[in-house]
Amino acid sequence: MHRYDLISCPECGVLHRKRPLGPREKARCVRCNALLYRGGGADLNRMAAIVVTAIVTYLIAQFSPIVNVEFNGLHSSSTLLGAIMVLWGEQMEVVATIVFVLTIVLPAVELGALLYVIQGLRAGRRVPGFDYLLRGVSAARHWGMTEVLMIGILISLVKLTSLAQVMVQPGLFAFGALTVMLTVVVAFDPRLLWDLGDQVIEAHGVKLDPFPAPDAASVPAMRYAALPGREPLLCHACGLVSQDIGQPRQHCPRCAKTLHRRHPDSVGRTWALLLAAAILYVPAMLLPVMYTQTLFNKSDDTIISGVVYFWTDDAKALATIIFIASIVVPVLKLAALSLLAWTAQRRSGWRPYQRTLLYRMVEFVGRWSMLDIFVITLTVALVRFQTLAVITAGPGALAFCAVVVLTMLASLQFDPRLIWDHLEPRALAAEDVENAVENEVANELANEVANEGANQVANGETDA
């Protein structure tokens, strides 16, 4: 059995045999329809060119002013880093640090690590730290929020036009281009780079595919093998399916990540994070997120008052976006994750496919709740016209930022495979499974074979 033959669904745990796909085809899980992998090979020259272009765009975006604001002869402009420094100076160190990491550090980590790894593979070698760099790319993609920042910039501009004259600067266009470039970069599947790295090792005479007898002396060499009758372990970092050798603390043989059959204490940690987020949600809605001071008056702005402001100012589209992203989405995330944790804790078999879809929706929309934090960051930095008009951040911003981070951590801690673990064991007949390809959906996904037992699934008898 070749190590590329097996792939485990990260959302329901079913094993599949990999099949070659065309450049625009996608393989999906036959049970929960999760995306398993994309077709096509890795064109390293093309990938390197796109990443270099994205890096140049990133540097322009970070060091160019985003917008220039004029108010009664006074001018104010700022880069993203300058806006974060203003927020830091107002004793909002936690919020400033989170914004800095999400919008500056993580995109830089992703682009820099990809370029370093790709250049090494082009030269026919695995660069030092190859495994950890690709693990960093996966983490950066989950938390990086350049596209959310771009929408936040646009909302800030609309808000500032009612206070002063706004002139667009090169940084705005650079961030728009960077958003597009990062969308293209995200389409690169890191697992293709893992596979190319393995091929480099094999080219130097190291054999990675032995399938010896399961004796103690050969266990370390069984890096990519799956033994009959024993469910293998999935590495969520590199996607490798590894043999469970029965050790209490086993590491992925390819990237060294700690392997677990299921996330440790998944439900308990999810409940703890959800409880903390629910408690902080109340002050996040009630406390001011911004203080506005002019020569004539002072005002406190909460998230709800911001929605009302845009709505009464005939910016109903923006009011709707903020209302959904900052008020509705956090509530729905708390409710959805609570439902998932409660049903998993009860070992419920109720509507597993629908609950899996719910989990995907939570993962997709989670980052968009940071929209208000980015709007606050830019507005505070740009409206600083001495005694004429000054906007400062309020304690509600800190509470709301904590709610967003906690709910994202809760969704990470929840293991969606728990949704399927308590169902009656079943297997899917390989000859009845058509190609689960998005461009050519199978007419019949599977014919259920009753009483086959979970071991057949663990042996890879399900095809995608």
Image: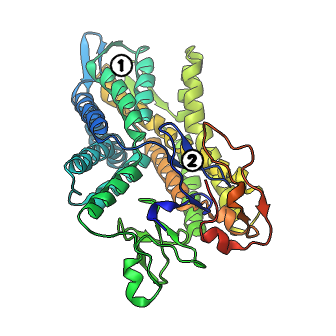
In the rendered image, the vertical position of residue 459 relative to residue 127, given as above or below:
below
Name the amino acid type tagged 2. Answer: Ala
Q: Residue furthest bottom?
A: 216
Q: Residues within 10 Å of mark 2 (few under 14, many from 20)?
A: many
Is there any visible trace of residue 313 in the rendered image? yes
Is there any visible trace of residue 386 in the rendered image? no
Residue at (25% x, 10% y) in the render: 73
What's the mark number on residue 27?
2
In the rendered image, the vertical position of residue 274 relative to residue 265, given as above or below:
above
Q: In this view, does 313 lie to the left or right of 291?
A: right
Residue at (77% x, 55% y) in the render: 351
Of badges 2 and 1, nearer the viewer stands: 2
The secondary structure type at the circle numbered 2 is: strand
Residue at (58% x, 44% y) in the render: 330
The one nearer the camera, 51 or 118, is 118
Name the amino acid type tagged 1. Answer: Leu
Counting residues from the start of the chain, the first of labels 2 and 1 encountered is 2
Residue 99: image quadrant is: top left
The one nearer the camera, 239 or 59, is 239
**What x and y, as percent, mark residue 303?**
53, 34
What's the mark number on residue 295?
1
Residue at (49% x, 31% y) in the render: 301
**What x and y, as percent, mark residue 8?**
55, 61
Q: Residues within 10 Å of mark 1 (few under 14, many from 20)?
A: few
What's the mark number on residue 35?
none
The one nearer the camera, 103 or 118, is 118
The secondary structure type at the circle numbered 1 is: loop
